[in-house]
Amino acid sequence: MLVDKQFRFGVGLHTVRSPAVLAETARRLEGFGFDVLHVPDHLGAPAPFPTLMAAAAATTTIRLGTYVLNACFYKPALLTRDIADVDLLSGGRLEVGLGAGYVRTEFEAAELPFPSAARRIAYLEHVATYVAAHQPRVPILIAGSGDRLLTVAARHAGTIGLTGARVAGTDDPLAERISFVRAVAGEKFDTLELNLAITAVPTDGAGLPDLSLTRRFAPTLTDEQLLAMPSVLSGSAREMADRLRDLRSRYGVSYFTVQQNHAAAFADVIAELR
């Protein structure tokens, strides 16, 4: 029987306009009740560590995270140096999210080779092992969906980031992926925190979300099929809160992340759950 873990909520910050706007945004997100402010790691997006340090200087309680660093962009010792100092200077609020990287054009723009998926995941494991050994107090999240990547996540992360994407041959892909993680993790599974990235949230009184981001990852699905995905929320704040309670009860997922443009609407959901 699943034991309900405490809810946690993260929010992704994807734009930085000025120091003043960043500081105000970080304080507002903290006031909304979010537990973690995340910055992604894509060329064209804000640089993760400088952005997180600016957010840390403007806030007092919200934790700071990467969701997720492209491990292939970094040498472990140099990355760990940055992790150590951001964690120190933020008062121990850093959480490190890692991934294998998947956008070939970003590797090319960075003048880096684009290895095979197997080699990228092997390097991710190398980085995660090094970070855990040299900064054991900093929590690690590893996000992905494939068997190899989730195996690495189960071995080296305290939090597993799930995408909620469809998996061929199953009617309940989230359950199937969690079952896979459980089998790989063994006795460690009960200590793991499961995270789900929410891709669509209603932002007005209509109760219907904008499905454009979700459709980007599942272009062949109908609106009805997209609305049924675990990563999509709809309805009132109370209905969305009930949906998250159900996801926690059924699957053990207790940590949910939303996008910056969802934050104000999602604050009402957080209030329902606390």
Image: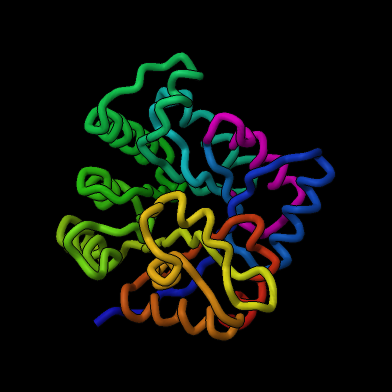
Instruction: Please give left or right for residue 177 compared with residue 210 in the image.
Output: left
In the image, is residue 42 above or below residue 169? above
User: What coloring was used for the rendering?
Assistant: rainbow
Q: Which region is colored magenta?
A: 42-64
Residue that lies at the very extreme toward the top in this rendered image = 111
Residue that lies at the very extreme toward the right in this rendered image = 20
In the image, is residue 240 above or below residue 156? below
Instruction: Please give left or right for residue 50 compared with residue 122 in the image.
Output: right
In the image, is residue 226 above or below residue 93? below
Q: Which residue is painted at 40% across and 44% down in the image?
A: 136
Q: Which residue is painted at 54% across and 84% down in the image?
A: 239
Name the spot of residue 22 as percent of width and height, x first.
Answer: 76, 45
Is 54 inside the magenta-drawn segment?
yes
Q: Which residue is painted at 61% across and 80% down in the image?
A: 237
Name the spot of residue 270 as percent of width and height, x first.
Answer: 60, 75
Is 86 inside the magenta-drawn segment?
no
Q: Which quadrant is home to the N terminus?
A: bottom left
In the image, is residue 139 above or below residue 135? below
Res 109 seen here:
yes
Q: Which residue is painted at 73% across and 66% down in the image?
A: 31
Q: Which quadrant is home to the C terminus?
A: bottom right
Where residue 192 sits, quadrant-wise, is bottom left
Name the spot of residue 265 as percent of width and height, x first.
Answer: 67, 70
Seen from the viewer's position, the closer of residues 206 and 100 is 206
Q: How many marks?
A: 0
Seen from the viewer's position, the closer of residues 59 and 241 is 241
Name the spot of residue 231 as percent of width and height, x first.
Answer: 44, 65
Res 159 seen here:
no
